[in-house]
Image (cartoon, rainbow, N blue to C red):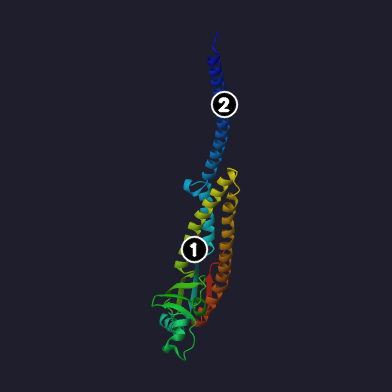
Amino acid sequence: MERPERAIARTNDVDARTRTGARWAGTGKGACGTCAGERLNERIYAVTPDRGGLGMQTRAVIERRWLALFRSRPVSLSSPYPVEECLRRLSTVSAQRGATPWYLSSRTVGCPEPRLRGDVEPSRIFVAEWKAASGRNSFVPWLDARLEPDGEGRTTFRGQIGLRPEVVTVLALIAGVGGLICMAMVVSGIAVLAHGHLSGLPLALWPFAMAAFIAGINFAGLRSLERDIPKLIREVNAVLDSTNADFASPTA
């Protein structure tokens, strides 16, 4: 006959195994949930820039299309004057300094305001409207053109009109770095939401608000650029008596 002490020990052992099995069963359910979350994270991170998936491709397409709106456009101006006269006319109405240093200089007292700002060289000009280029607007169009005599006493100015190269570089950096940051925040927010934490909601939505703000600024800059390009061409035409001005439209 079994002793009472052994029977009690065996019963306790069975109860312990039962409790351990229940814990493992619960852990198994939790592990399945964890695996599901990990699989979801893998699907999410599979399209992030770090993995070079769909997210990277989408960001690159958006960046290219956005920067294409600000690309320089080919332009050709034809003046009836020879190169020397064109340079003289441009130099007379141009200044390299902005409004504040120009007004403060004693050399410009009594002089009429410049019409253009930039560089006028024997073989190349790089100019913008003086008042527009003297302000804080970064979306000012600049004319970068070469002087080409045609052998009959006329001069053709052939080049591009658009934003300064430095501004385009900054826009590209904003598009690249900002896009990566926004996508990383969205992915992180979705991953937190996938684990049942509502704290990931602001993290996932905030980049959209920031993108809308940046898009608004760039939309205003694009409108300003489109408005000022014809003004610059008319100003240069008035100085050079240009007979035509051909440049590509934004959608070309």
User: Is residue 215 shown left or right of residue 172?
Assistant: right
Residue toward you, 206 or 137: 206
Residue toward you, 69 or 38: 38
Residue toward you, 113 or 157: 113
Pick out the residue farthest to the top. Answer: 1
Pick out the residue farthest to the front. Answer: 4
Above-or-below relation of 173 to 145: above
Q: Amino acid at mark 1?
A: Leu
Above-or-below relation of 85 to 160: below
Whichever of callouts 1 and 2 sits on the residue coming sooner in the sequence is: 2
Residue at mark 1: 171
Q: Amino acid at mark 2?
A: Arg
Mark carried by residue 40: none
The mark closer to the camera, 1 or 2, is: 2
Residue at mark 2: 19
Above-or-below relation of 9 to 238: above
Quick one: quadrant of the C terminus? bottom right
Pick out the residue farthest to the bottom. Answer: 110
On the image, the x and y values in percent for residue 165 come to 45, 67
On the image, the x and y values in percent for residue 164 come to 46, 69
User: Is residue 120 shown left or right of residue 226?
Assistant: left
Above-or-below relation of 80 to 198: below
Quick one: quadrant of the N terminus? top right
For mark 1, give the secondary structure. helix
For mark 2, give the secondary structure. helix
User: In which quarter of the view is residue 223 placed?
Assistant: bottom right
